[in-house]
């Protein structure tokens, strides 16, 4: 899609009464917004306004026209437009958590590079669990020990990065503190 043509087209679209925003979605939105070049946000549903926008676009772009109410009930769509999209006209849209069943979570990033290898291994077993094998009466026995991450259903996002429900975050931070690891907390809302 031609960005210059999109900005020129936006000059005409923004003149239509009831058009709140025009957004050029980024590449991250491509899965949710399949083949959509422009998103036009209207304050309220109006077939005449939708038709006027369609007439202006006239096949130059693939557009998606939505209302504020639709954005409030579709968090995946809203999330797809955030991040790397470009706002061509209007103000960014704030969506409240009301009625969206969002969950309060914490992203914990921790650093173990300043720890000695023994403490690093102990922290890893405390967080992720471990396996113990031993022989008893000539029989090899394998016993698994669950870690905090599996007990509280935390998600490992990457090396040294966990996403935890807010009310369970203290279990992880207390463990990190006990092993003197460095960490940061980032509060987020997810659906």
Image: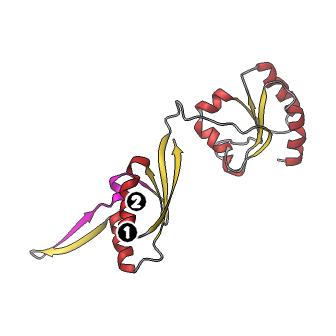
Residue 173 vertical position relative to residue 88 in the rendered view, above or below: below
* Residue 64, visible in the rendered structure: yes
Whole-percent x, y for residue 48 in the image: 81, 19
Q: Residue at x 22, y 68 (%)?
A: 142
Q: Secondary structure at mark 2?
A: helix
Q: Is residue 95 left or right of residue 152?
A: right
In the rendered image, residue 179 lying in the magenta stretch gets the answer no
Whole-percent x, y for residue 111 in the image: 48, 69
Q: Residue at x 77, y 20 (%)?
A: 47
Q: Earlier in the sequence, mark 1 or mark 2?
A: 1
Residue 95 vertical position relative to residue 184 in the rendered view, above or below: above
* Residue toward you, 35 or 13: 13
Q: Is residue 174 left or right of residue 86?
A: left
Q: Residue at x 90, y 41 (%)?
A: 8
* Residue 128, visible in the rendered structure: no
Front position among marks 1 and 2: 2
Q: Tell me the residue that label 2 is attached to.
A: 173
Residue 57 vertical position relative to residue 31 in the rendered view, above or below: above
The residue segment tinted magenta is: 139-155
Q: Residues within 10 Å of mark 2 (few under 14, many from 20)?
A: some
Q: Which mark is residue 146?
A: none
Toward the left, the furthest residue is 137
Q: Tell me the residue that label 1 is attached to.
A: 124
Q: Residue at x 64, y 39 (%)?
A: 78
Q: Is residue 29 left or right of residue 15?
A: left
Q: Is residue 73 left or right of residue 12?
A: left
Q: Secondary structure at mark 1?
A: helix
* Residue toward you, 33 or 42: 42
In the rendered image, residue 148 lying in the magenta stretch gets the answer yes
Do the residues under discs 1 and 2 have CB atoms within 8 angstroms? Answer: no
Whole-percent x, y for residue 167 in the image: 39, 47
């Amino acid at each position: 899609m031609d960005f210059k043509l999109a900005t020129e087209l936006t000059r005409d679209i923004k003149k239509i009464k009831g058009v709140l925003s025009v957004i050029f979605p980024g590449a991250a939105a491509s899965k949710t917004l399949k083949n959509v070049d422009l998103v036009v946000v209207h304050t309220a549903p109006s077939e005449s306004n939708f038709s006027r926008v369609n007439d202006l676009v006239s096949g130059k772009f693939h557009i998606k026209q939505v209302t504020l109410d639709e954005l409030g009930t579709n968090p995946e769509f809203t999330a797809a437009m955030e991040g790397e999209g470009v706002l061509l006209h209007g103000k960014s849209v704030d969506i409240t958590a009301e009625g969206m069943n969002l969950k309060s979570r914490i992203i914990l990033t921790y650093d173990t590079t300043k720890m000695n290898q023994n403490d690093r291994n102990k922290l890893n077993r405390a967080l992720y669990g471990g396996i113990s094998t031993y022989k008893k009466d000539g029989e090899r026995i394998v016993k698994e020990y669950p870690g905090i991450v599996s007990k509280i259903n935390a998600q490992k996002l990457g090396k040294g990065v966990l996403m935890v429900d807010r009310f369970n975050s203290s279990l992880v931070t207390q463990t990190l503190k006990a092993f003197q690891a460095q960490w940061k907390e980032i509060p987020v809302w997810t659906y």
